[in-house]
């Protein structure tokens, strides 16, 4: 069964709701309930994003959200500093319902919202056959990176189990955490996921994928079609210190050229998939070469 079509990624759904709130602020409980009620985002298992996932997404997008306390999140504007949300050159002008785009132009908020993927560029409803294909379209997770990240590891798109849990490399059969743990000399495998993320960020390592979304029945890379790449140009703003971009496997490595074209050093690593254990010693040596 395909993952349910999502209208927005979770951080986009959070923006949609917070744009309508006083001071662009809401609690994680309110965001979870409102996003679910309006059907703006659902997880791979069909459930509404819980408060813990809302909070984690806000932490992963510090250029968009400010966490005020353990329960409240404020929208601070795309690509702006935290000070912007406190009134200095705020990206959002509440008095006239306009928003400032990155190039300094003013547009109405409604024009800045992501398009509805159920329609094509001309606004026409998708055909029944196209809708069947779209039912298998899957959207990736938010990146794990910050302004200190120096090494970024790109996969293709998380498998269904990872999408359902909202965690990178959640399938136990994948050797990713074992290989990266060996490279960093950290015991990542048995850590809780949140601890894994904190450890990676502390070691200046980030995670993302080459595809923002794709059509994929099941979780196999060989079944991927209708790919849409992530916006790698955004790395210059979100993670300006990235010096090396690694690709987890050959499928991800097919996107090496556009990333290298942006000026990054690149490296294609042997896939961490559990099905790729023929030359484990060589694979381990390759992964250890990324150590900071």
Image: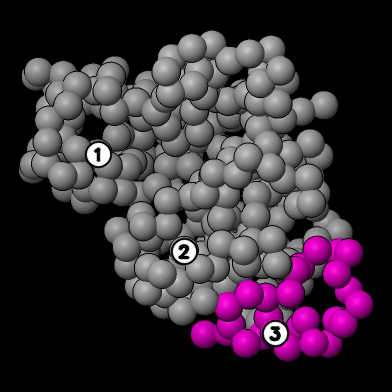
Magenta stretch in the rendered image: 267-292
Observer-side mark, 1 or 3, equals: 3
| Residue at the spot of label 3 | 286
| Residue at the spot of label 2 | 258
> Which is nearer the eye, 163 or 251?
251
> Which is nearer the eye, 24 or 213?
213
Q: Is residue 26 left or right of residue 228?
A: left
Q: Residues within 10 Å of mark 2 (few under 14, many from 20)?
A: few
> Which is nearer the eye, 277 or 191?
277
Asked if disc 2 and disc 1 are in contact, CB closer than 8 Å, the reply is no
In magenta stretch: residue 137:
no
Q: Say what secondary structure mark 1 lies in.
A: loop
Where's the N terminus, which quadrant? top right
Specify the label residue 77 is tagged with. Answer: 1
Asked if disc 2 and disc 3 are in contact, CB closer than 8 Å, the reply is no
Tell which circle, 2 or 3, labels the residue nearer the N-terminal end.
Answer: 2
Q: Say what secondary structure mark 2 lies in.
A: helix
Query: Furthest-right residue in view?
Result: 278
Report which quarter residue 127 is drawn in.
top right
Q: Residue at x 54, y 31 (%)?
A: 51
Is residue 181 shown above or below 117? Answer: below
Q: Residues within 10 Å of mark 3 (few under 14, many from 20)?
A: some
Is residue 195 shown above or below 120? Answer: below
Observer-side mark, 2 or 1, equals: 2
Residue 69's spot in the image, x, y percent?
36, 39
Tell which circle, 1 or 3, labels the residue nearer the N-terminal end.
Answer: 1
Residue 181's spot in the image, x, y percent?
69, 75
């Amino acid at each position: 069964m395909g993952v349910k079509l999502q209208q927005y990624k979770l951080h986009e759904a959070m923006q949609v709701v917070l744009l309508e709130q006083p001071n662009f602020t809401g609690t994680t409980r309110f965001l979870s309930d409102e996003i679910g009620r309006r059907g703006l985002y659902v997880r791979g298992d069909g459930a509404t994003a819980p408060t813990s996932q809302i909070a984690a997404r806000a932490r992963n997008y510090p250029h968009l959200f400010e966490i005020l306390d353990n329960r409240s999140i404020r929208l601070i504007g795309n690509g702006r500093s935290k000070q912007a949300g406190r009134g200095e050159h705020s990206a959002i002008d509440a008095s006239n319902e306009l928003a400032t785009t990155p190039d300094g132009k003013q547009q109405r908020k409604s024009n800045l919202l992501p398009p509805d993927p159920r329609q094509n560029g001309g606004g026409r409803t998708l055909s029944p056959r196209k809708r069947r294909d779209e039912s298998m379209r899957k959207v990736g997770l938010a990146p794990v990176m910050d302004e200190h990240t120096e090494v970024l590891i790109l996969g293709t798109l998380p498998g269904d189990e990872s999408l359902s849990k909202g965690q990178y490399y959640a399938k136990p059969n994948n050797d990713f955490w074992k290989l990266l743990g060996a490279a960093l000399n950290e015991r990542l495998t048995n850590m809780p996921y949140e601890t894994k993320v904190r450890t990676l960020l502390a070691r200046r390592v980030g995670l993302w994928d080459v595809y923002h979304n794709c059509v994929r029945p099941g979780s196999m890379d060989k079944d991927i079609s209708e790919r849409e790449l992530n916006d790698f140009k955004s790395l210059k703003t979100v993670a300006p210190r990235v010096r090396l971009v690694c690709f987890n496997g050959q499928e991800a490595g097919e996107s090496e050229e556009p990333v290298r074209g942006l000026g990054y050093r690149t490296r294609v690593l042997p896939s961490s998939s559990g099905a790729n254990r023929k030359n484990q010693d060589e694979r381990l040596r390759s992964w250890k070469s990324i150590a900071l």
